[in-house]
Image (cartoon, rainbow, N blue to C red):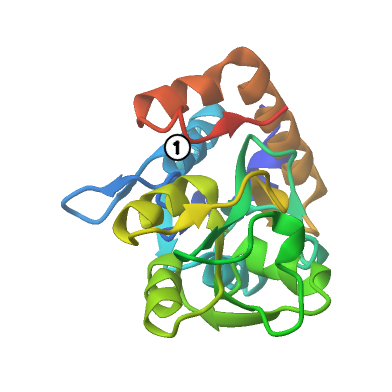
């Protein structure tokens, strides 16, 4: 592997990996010492192994903070969703897995279809700076987004404040529905969240390496094997 890539992707000699802890599908657990466990940490470890680099995880509570760490130069790569606003400062590889974004509505809601959500007076609970928050911010014309940090807090606010809709990722919303009597998920999706690996935009060789790595990992079955290993193969799909 080219020394140019090693030097560019990890100038300090240690690959600093930014991990978003709020995506419970990609970070499914933590070791006793706090080390993140899951698909995205394993992807990062495989990158370090391929490049023969030491590495360290730097964990952040949500994707917004993880993206900020990248732009601030605190980390060398990040494992978060591709999103147009983030892509202004982060060079993303092609996605390695994807998750549907949809809505949950409360018992008795007259809303039965996704295209009925974007109407005046509709209030949507959403996790602040999640990829789907950024997407909905650009896309919605009439409904109001009510933000709070993290999907668990958004679900709590949805119930407590009697909001009309809860936005989120389908697998997580399925779990929310079990805890909210009478609630139901809407069929279909408003977007597909594409999970990727990114680096700084001024690291072209590193970005090209990450792009090749993600493509190869999807085609070779490596991503599929990680989804199985961490018990999320029924909730996530290999990007393609």
Side (left or right) of 149 relative to 129: left
Quarter of the image that includes the N terminus: top right
Left or right of 221? Residue 107 is: left
Which of 138 and 41 lies nearest the eye of the viewer? 138
Look at the image and tell me whether residue 200 can be seen: no
Q: Is residue 184 visible?
A: yes
Q: Is residue 217 left or right of residue 48?
A: right
Q: Please name the residue shown 39% across and 75% down the image.
A: 159
Q: Position of residue 235 (x, y in %)?
A: 48, 35
The residue that mark 1 highlights is 39
Instruction: Classify residue 121 as left or right of residue 35.
Output: right
Q: Position of residue 222 (x, y in %)?
A: 53, 20
Q: Nearer the viewer, residue 238 or 192?
A: 192
In front of the other: 219 or 239: 239
Residue at figure coordinates x 56%, y 81% from the top left: 147
| Residue 67 placement: quadrant | bottom right
189 is higher (above) or lower (below) than 147 = above
Q: Residue at x 79, y 79 (%)?
A: 142
Considering only vertical position in the picture, is 16 above or below 47?
A: below
Q: Secondary structure at mark 1?
A: helix
Q: Position of residue 74 (x, y in %)?
A: 54, 69
Instruction: Give the answer, above or below, for where 80 lies relative to 128.
Output: above
Quadrant of image for the C terminus: top right
Q: How many badges with numbers are in the image?
A: 1
Q: Position of residue 232 (x, y in %)?
A: 42, 33
Relative height, residue 197 to residue 182 (above, below): above
Q: Residue at x 78, y 38 (%)?
A: 208
> In terms of depth relative to the viewer, which is nearer, 19 or 199?
19
Q: Can you name the residue that lies furthest to the top here? A: 220
Q: Residues within 10 Å of mark 1 (few under 14, many from 20)?
A: many
């Amino acid at each position: 592997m080219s020394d140019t890539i090693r030097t560019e992707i990890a100038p300090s000699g240690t690959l600093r990996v930014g991990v978003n802890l709020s995506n419970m599908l990609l970070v499914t657990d933590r070791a006793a010492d706090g080390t993140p466990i899951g698909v995205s940490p394993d992807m990062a470890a495989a990158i370090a192994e391929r490049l023969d680099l030491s590495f360290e995880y730097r964990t952040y509570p949500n994707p917004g903070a993880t993206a900020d760490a990248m732009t601030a130069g605190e980390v060398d790569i990040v494992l978060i969703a591709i999103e147009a606003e983030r892509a202004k400062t982060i060079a993303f590889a092609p996605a390695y897995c994807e998750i549907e974004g949809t809505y949950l509505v409360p018992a008795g809601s007259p809303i039965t279809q996704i295209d009925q959500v974007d109407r005046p007076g509709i209030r949507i609970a959403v996790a602040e700076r999640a990829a789907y928050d950024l997407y909905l911010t650009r896309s919605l014309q009439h409904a109001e987004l009510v933000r709070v940090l993290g999907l668990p807090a958004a679900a709590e606010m949805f119930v407590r404040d009697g909001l009309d809709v809860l936005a989120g990722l389908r697998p997580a919303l399925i779990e929310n529905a079990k805890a909210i009597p009478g609630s139901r998920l809407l069929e279909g999706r408003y977007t597909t969240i594409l999970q990727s690996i990114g680096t700084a935009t001024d690291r072209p060789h590193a970005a090209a390496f990450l792009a090749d790595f993600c493509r190869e990992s999807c085609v070779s079955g490596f991503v599929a094997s990680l989804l199985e290993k961490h018990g999320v193969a029924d909730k996530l799909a290999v990007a393609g």
